[in-house]
């Protein structure tokens, strides 16, 4: 289990993210996370393991017998889905992942229906959930809450794993995992993901999916990253500083069509106006040149792909939806499989599933 009992919270909180990783491993000698909190926990070998496990699970699940077999693995366990921030895809894909493995689930999706309405802190709510469940999958607008609660639970008499399904504006590790899984599967018969160019477009300043995926891409060889956005929403310096430190080539531009012509994957994002400091702040920004439509589609190579974490507004025209290069619907389904693999691995089932007779 996690070794967060070895360090005081104040010291752990101040560590760089990569330095926190050893404290979050499932066991000594196994780098698989016990608590999944941020993208920096995953290196290339670990990503390869999760991709292999996801592929194995989806193969087993193709038959009725295989599906029933998968449900037997965790039918004795319970998972709490605590989503105090609005969500549909992230909630449902985690719920479906739990169901694939047989987990019984409970959920709170509105603080008004919990004791937080009476003034209970989120920390106390999560400690309460740990009394009834064997895993907590949580999504919160509060930055760092998942990390703090992972430390609290590891130092309690009821240590259970936490999966971060989105925290504040900084991290969304399971979204980044499904994005990597989509990229790997999209290029697995076309030479692989190494050496590709990935373009991010939209609200790159506040998009936590961009932040997490950008980091995970540094685990692949010679992957160039291009950031396309209006200057008010361009990628923050802390992201590009990591790329520069790791020697990853990147480019900052406002020309989506030019970037599309040289890219293998386009990752579109919506404007994150829920984080506006003043009402209507984002609406004042001209985003008309940062939308993907028929003309941009014509610039994309025949083997290129279009991705989006969804929900979508108007940043991808619906005329793109039926193009075989549009991967955003497949991307959603991939999320269910990689999250199933992550949950299975968190409970130590990786070898059991990989080596089973199906």
Image (spheres, rainbow, N blue to C red):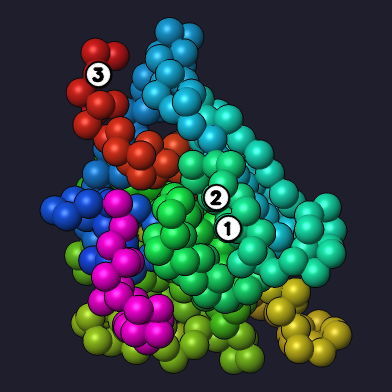
Q: Nearer the viewer, residue 235 or 211?
A: 211
Whether the residues at callouts 2 and 1 have beta carbons within 8 Å, the answer is: yes
Q: Which residue is mark 3?
A: 356
- Label 2 and label 3: CA atoms lie apart by 31 Å
Q: Which residues are magenta?
A: 1-21
Task: Examine the rendering and report whether any part of residue 79 can be seen.
Answer: yes
| Figure check: 279 above or below 302 | below
Residue 224 coordinates in the image, percent (x, y):
31, 72
Residue 349 coordinates in the image, percent (x, y):
30, 33
- N-term-proximal mark, 2 vs 3: 2
| Figure check: 254 above or below 96 | below
Q: Which mark is residue 221?
A: none
- Label 1 and label 3: CA atoms lie apart by 36 Å
Q: Name the residue rendered at 85%, 84% in the picture.
A: 280
Q: Bin the neighbour count of mark 1 within 10 Å (Cα to Cα): few under 14, some 14-19, many 20 and up.
A: some
Q: Which residue is mark 1?
A: 127
- Please indicate whether residue 211 sits to the left or right of residue 80 in the image: left
Tell us which disc is closer to us: 1 or 3: 1
Residue 173 falls in image quadrant: bottom left
């Amino acid at each position: 289990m996690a070794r967060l009992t070895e360090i005081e919270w104040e010291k752990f909180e101040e560590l760089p993210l990569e330095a926190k990783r050893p404290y979050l491993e499932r066991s000594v000698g196994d780098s698989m996370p016990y608590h999944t909190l941020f993208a920096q926990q995953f290196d290339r070998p670990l990503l390869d393991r999760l991709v292999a496990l996801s592929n194995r699970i989806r193969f087993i699940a193709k038959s009725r017998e295989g599906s029933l077999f998968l449900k037997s693995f965790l039918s004795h366990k319970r998972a709490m889905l605590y989503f105090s921030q609005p969500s549909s895809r992230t909630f449902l894909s985690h719920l479906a992942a739990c169901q694939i493995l047989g987990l019984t689930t409970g959920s709170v999706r509105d603080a008004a229906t919990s004791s937080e309405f009476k003034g209970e802190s989120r920390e106390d709510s999560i400690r309460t959930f740990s009394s009834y469940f064997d895993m907590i999958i949580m999504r919160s607008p509060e930055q760092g809450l998942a990390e703090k609660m992972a430390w609290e639970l590891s130092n309690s008499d009821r240590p259970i794993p936490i999966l971060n399904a989105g925290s504040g504006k900084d991290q969304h590790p399971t979204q980044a995992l499904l994005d990597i899984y989509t990229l790997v599967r999209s290029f697995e018969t076309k030479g692989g993901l190494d050496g590709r160019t990935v373009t991010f477009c939209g609200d790159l300043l506040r998009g936590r999916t961009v932040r997490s995926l950008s980091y995970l891409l540094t685990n692949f060889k010679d992957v160039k990253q291009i950031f396309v956005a209006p200057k008010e929403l361009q990628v923050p310096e802390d992201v590009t500083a990591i790329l520069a430190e790791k020697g990853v080539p990147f480019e900052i531009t406002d020309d989506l069509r030019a970037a599309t012509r040289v890219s293998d994957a386009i990752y579109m994002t919506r404007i994150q106006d829920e984080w506006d400091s003043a009402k209507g702040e984002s609406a004042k920004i001209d985003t008309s040149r940062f939308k993907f439509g028929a003309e941009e589609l014509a610039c994309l190579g025949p083997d290129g792909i279009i991705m989006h974490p969804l929900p979508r507004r108007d940043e991808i025209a619906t005329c793109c939806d039926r193009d075989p290069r549009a991967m955003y619907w497949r991307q959603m389904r991939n999320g269910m499989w990689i999250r199933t693999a992550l949950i299975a691995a968190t409970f130590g089932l990786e070898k059991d599933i990989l080596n089973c007779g199906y």
